[in-house]
Amino acid sequence: MAGGRLNAPGMEELPLPSRTRVVFGENTVDGLGDLVRDLAAGAGRVLLVTDPGLVAIGHVARAEAALRAAGLDVHRHDAVRQNPDTTDVDACRDAITATNPDVLVGFGGGSTIDAAKGANFVFAGGGRMEDYWGKNKAKGTLLPLVAVPTTAGTGTELQSFALIQQASTHQKMACGDPQALPRLAVLDPTLTVTLPRDITACTALDTLGHAIETAVTRARTDTSAPLSGEAFRLVHAHLPEVLADPGDLASRGALLRAAALGGCAIEHSMLGAAHAMANPLTAHRRIPHGHAVALALPHVIRFNAEDPAVATIYAGLARDVDLASASTIDRDAAHSLADRVGSLCDLAGLTRVLTAFDVEEADLDALATEAARQWTAQFNPRDVDAGTFRSLFRAALTPR
Ligand SMILES: [Fe+2]
């Protein structure tokens, strides 16, 4: 490995079942230039895709300094917004066209990395983001993408899909291709230590949702199962620690690992009904994604636990963290898992009732219809239709 900083104490490669090289450690971002050089030996020009908040806080200057120290010509596009839509992708595509980089660096939360991923499709293949909605849709050769997450949540740094909203409809489009997978992910907990409490909690609960949903989908595999289990154990152990002490770098690092493991689990499994419910809640009620997932998840767990095989998997997760004993029957252990997701929401100070977001009985049909149309619904271990989703949203209307 080139560059002295890459041998810094605590820096390690995470051996995950992924084509993405994953480098983890405190201050790893200071070796970003050397890592990019390792990735693309002839690279001269880099476009850093980020957002204005990360510029203001100084993280972007740190990344740019590391890239310049390795002799790279660095350009910046810093206009990506939360929950990026097709206009964010078009703006990023224009920045790529204007700067003609050899490597793209997505530096930010899941929104930013996804916008860079989406723009990579459109830059390489032309047309609109909608043309890449679905699987294996890339045209041409995509630029090498480096992902540097500054939140610990989506795990998009280990995924070949970008989630982009259609600007006109707010429909979330999952656009994926093996080429879109980041070639390198740099996980540095010093970049997440300054996150505010609400973002820390929402992103960690998103990871929790990835762990629990990937564990049980119809598409789960022997490869995804241990990733789901480890991601769950890490969030369960370390989210309370980070909430109690936001400056705890070791626990921040554990959440970053969990997010990457969860992202990798999604690549080898899929997501389910809680993510299908979260999308319309985010689109129409502006509930942050991770909060929406966590709000739906306990109800989905109780519904899915009616299938004995699924209850056994949930029970395994619950027993791993001592939420249930070996003698607890699976269904009860699964319900303990659902209760624990709720208590983690409470710990984070996040409401668990939809009425807090002005959702009323009269809104449930529209939400349920939209949830049933979400791609992830088909991977839920039990069949779910609009009627099922109506019942699940109904359960989330009032406290349990
Ligand atoms: Fe998610």
Image (spheres, grey):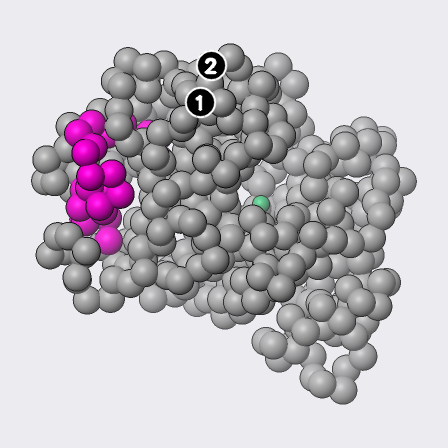
Magenta range is: 28-52
Disc 1 and disc 2: Cα gap in Å?
Answer: 9 Å
Q: Is residue 125 visible?
A: yes
Residue 38: within the magenta?
yes
**Which quarter of the picture shows residue 169?**
top right
Which label was assigned to residue 105? none
Quadrant containing the N terminus is bottom left
- 360 lies left or right of 114: right
Q: Residue shown at 12%/52% (left/top)?
A: 3
**Which of the two discs, 1 and 2, labels the residue nearer the N terminus?**
2
Task: Look at label 1 and name its amino acid.
Answer: Gly
Of residues 231 and 132, the one nearer the viewer is 132
Of residues 210 and 291, the one nearer the viewer is 210
- 74 lies left or right of 213: left
Q: In x, y percent, where is residue 238?
A: 46, 66
**Which quarter of the picture shows residue 344?**
bottom right
Q: In x, y percent, where is residue 38?
A: 22, 46
